[in-house]
């Protein structure tokens, strides 16, 4: 294999967080897919070819896909998340069966490696049975050698967000699997304040909104991030942002809240993207509603964490 960029397939691509991390590490994207039309607006605004193909993954003719070396997939997690219904593989409505579409592609294209990402609870879902099924398919049926580990954005990416996600990495070559090492923990050196702009539009402030009277006494520190939990305010005692979730876009007050000299406000969509490690110059479509942008940010990955995994995958592929 030439020491040029290894080729990657970007599945369940969202707005391209995994792609960004791998391209920062020298990989080349040859195909990208998601079934969300709103994601395409953000994805295509930030990446050149290939643009995002919006299509049901089951309707992709796998043999027509370009050849690739690594399959990448942050496959839907709602069916396995503690915050969801936990319907698992049977929950087709939230994509619980979509792991099998990945297995189908691995079986037909047989790339030399893959990286999958999902919620921490995937490992414990249904008393561990779900993860055992995934592991059995990858190892025994598809003949990959795998490693899996839960990584946290604040301990593995120097991003002040308490976000735990499981990463499953696999190689056809057992020696490469054995050589692969997940990134070690590193100190968190950044404060959430570094990601928060001094200014924000008035629409993000609660000062003149009905909720203000209920939260004003509990949100009293500029050094803490808060959440409104329907009936009470919860302060994040670790001094970081709580896990950004896709349901930030479902209305209500799911977006983390901060206090500054101007008052009490929720984080902006741009700040949420930055707290996922996206660069300041990452573009957000002006025509998309904030609800869509919050959903996209919470549904994405923390880019620096994925980039550390990508760099290690590249290292062992070049051995």
Image (cartoon, grey):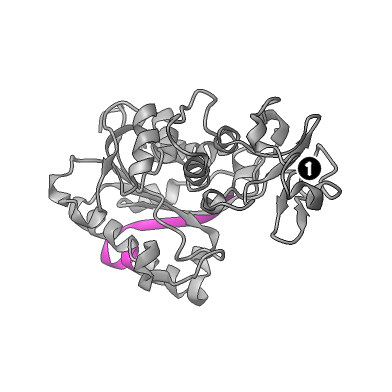
Residue 65 in picture, x, y percent from top left: 17, 44
Q: Is residue 143 magenta?
A: yes
* Nearest to the observer: residue 190 or residue 148: 190
Q: Is residue 149 magenta?
A: yes
Q: Which stretch did the figure color magenta?
A: 137-151
The answer to whether residue 271 is above or below residue 9 is above
> Of residues 20 and 245, which is closer to you in this image?
245
- How many numbered markers are drawn? 1
Q: Residue 123's x, y, as percent?
A: 50, 65
Residue 241 at x, y percent in the picture: 68, 44
Q: Is residue 318 visible?
A: no
Q: Residues within 10 Å of mark 1 (few under 14, many from 20)?
A: some
Q: Residue at point 60% right, 44% down?
A: 153
Q: Residue at x 78, y 42 (%)?
A: 224
Residue, disc 1: 224
The residue that appears at 55% across and 43% down in the rendered structure is 183
The front one of 273 and 177 is: 273
Q: Is residue 266 above or below residue 48?
A: below
* Residue 45 visible in the shown view: yes
Name the residue rendered at 77%, 59% in the picture: 232
At numbered mark 1, what does the secondary structure look like: helix, strand or loop?
loop
Image x and y of residue 163, in percent:
60, 50
């Amino acid at each position: 294999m030439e020491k040029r960029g290894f080729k990657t397939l970007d599945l369940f691509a969202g707005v391209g967080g995994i792609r960004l991390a791998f391209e920062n590490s020298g990989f080349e994207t040859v195909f990208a897919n998601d079934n969300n039309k709103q994601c395409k607006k953000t994805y295509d605004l930030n990446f050149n070819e290939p643009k995002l193909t919006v299509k049901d993954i089951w309707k992709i003719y796998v043999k027509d896909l370009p050849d690739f070396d690594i399959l990448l997939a942050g496959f839907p997690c709602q069916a396995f998340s503690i915050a969801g219904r936990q319907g698992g593989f049977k929950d087709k409505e939230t994509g619980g069966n979509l792991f099998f579409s990945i297995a189908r592609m691995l079986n037909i294209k047989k790339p030399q490696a893959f990286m999958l990402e999902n919620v921490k609870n995937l490992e414990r879902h249904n008393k561990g049975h779900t993860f055992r099924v995934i592991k059995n398919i990858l190892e025994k049926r598809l003949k990959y050698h795998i490693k899996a580990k839960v990584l946290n954005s604040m301990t593995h990416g120097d991003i002040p967000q308490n976000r735990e996600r499981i990463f499953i990495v696999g190689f056809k070559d057992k020696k490469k699997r054995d050589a692969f090492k997940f990134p070690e923990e590193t100190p968190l050196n950044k404060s959430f304040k570094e990601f928060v702009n001094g200014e924000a539009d008035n629409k993000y402030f609660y000062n003149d909104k009905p909720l203000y009277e209920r939260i004003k006494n509990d949100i009293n520190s500029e050094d803490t991030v808060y959440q409104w939990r329907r009936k009470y305010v919860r302060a994040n005692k670790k001094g970081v942002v709580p896990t950004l979730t896709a349901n930030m876009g479902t209305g209500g007050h799911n977006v983390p809240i901060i206090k500054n000299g101007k008052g009490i406000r929720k984080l902006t969509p741009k700040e949420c993207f930055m707290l996922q490690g996206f660069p300041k110059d990452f573009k957000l479509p002006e025509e998309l509603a904030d609800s869509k942008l919050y959903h996209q940010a919470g549904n994405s990955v923390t880019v620096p964490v994925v980039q550390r995994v990508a760099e290690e995958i590249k290292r062992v592929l070049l051995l």
